[in-house]
Every structure is written in C-alpha cells, then in structure tokens.
Amino acid sequence: MTLDERIDKIVKVLDDKKAEEIEVFNLDDADYIAKRVVIANSIGGKHTQALFDHLKNELKPMGEEFIGSDVSDEWVVADMGDILVHIMIPQYRQRYSLEAFLSELTAKKAE
C-alpha cells in the first residue's frame, strides 16, 4: 500500500467516526520526522481516545504499525513511522496551532 493510500485509509476512519476538520500535510521534502501529518479535531473528551482506538482496530489488521503514542482525553499523538496522527479537542488545536508550524515547513520546502 502506498503512503497516499495509507493516508486515505486514516482519513476515512477518522471521518467515519465523526472527527472534524481533518487536514493532511505533505512533508516529503521538508526537514521533519514524518512524511505526512494528519490533524483532526475530536468532539471532545473521550471521543479523542475513541478515535485513536478505532484507528488502531481498523488499521492494524491491514498491517499498519503504531510505533508509539501519547494518549489523553485532550490530545492523542500516534507515531506510525512516516506518518504522525494528531487527534485533539478544538481548544488544543487552536492553542498549539500545529497548522501554522506545518504550513511554515511546507512553505520552506517550496522555496
């Protein structure tokens, strides 16, 4: 399965389970630890962890490997090697503004 096909599966699982504002950042040419980053909002609280559980349950049988994760009710970070998935409550997403950081990285690769 290609990287883009894997991303499509991640986005589909998150979307099917009611994640909001799903964004994918392509960092192929950026100096970053992953080639793709997926960011999604949870509805809140336990939904954050539930989305992560759905990802693991649906993707592991397809051969996806979850190398590491940091899990709380507010924010989950899942390391899948060349893909990082961030699932967070909207307040955290606004506060930490990962999109700005990742957009800056992608802008630098375009220069």
Image: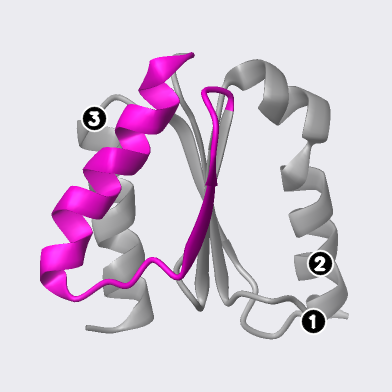
Q: What is the distance, in whole Å, between disc 2 and disc 3 at their CAs?
A: 29 Å
Marks 1/3 in contact by CB < 8 Å: the verdict is no
Residue 89 screen position, x and y as percent:
57, 21
Counting the numbered discs, the total is 3
Answer with the quarter of the image where residue 7 lies. Answer: bottom left
Sequence-earlier tag: 2 or 1? 1
Within 10 angstroms of label 1, few (less than 14), some, or many (20 or more) residues? few
Marks 2/1 in contact by CB < 8 Å: the verdict is yes
Q: Is residue 97 visible?
A: yes
Span colored in magenta: 45-74
Mark 1 element type: loop
Which labelled disc corresponds to residue 17? 3
- Residue 46 higher or lower than 13, as above or below: above
Which residue: 38% across, 66% down?
66
Within 10 angstroms of label 3, few (less than 14), some, or many (20 or more) residues? some
- Residue 19 higher or lower than 62, as above or below: above
Rendered-image quadrant of the N terminus: bottom left
Q: Kindly identify the amino acid type of the residue bearing the numbered disc 1.
A: Asp
- Residue 63 higher or lower than 38, as above or below: below
Sequence-earlier tag: 1 or 3? 3
- Residue 105 higher or lower than 85, as above or below: below
Q: Kindly identify the amino acid type of the residue bearing the numbered disc 2.
A: Leu
Which of labels 2 and 3 is toward the front?
Answer: 3
Residue at the spot of label 2: 105
Q: What is the distance, in whole Å, between disc 1 and disc 3 at their CAs?
A: 32 Å
Of 107 and 99, which appears nearest the observer?
99
Residue 102 screen position, x and y as percent:
75, 57
Residue at the spot of label 1: 31
Residue 33 screen position, x and y as percent:
69, 76
Which residue: 20% across, 60% down?
59
Rendered-image quadrant of the C terminus: bottom right
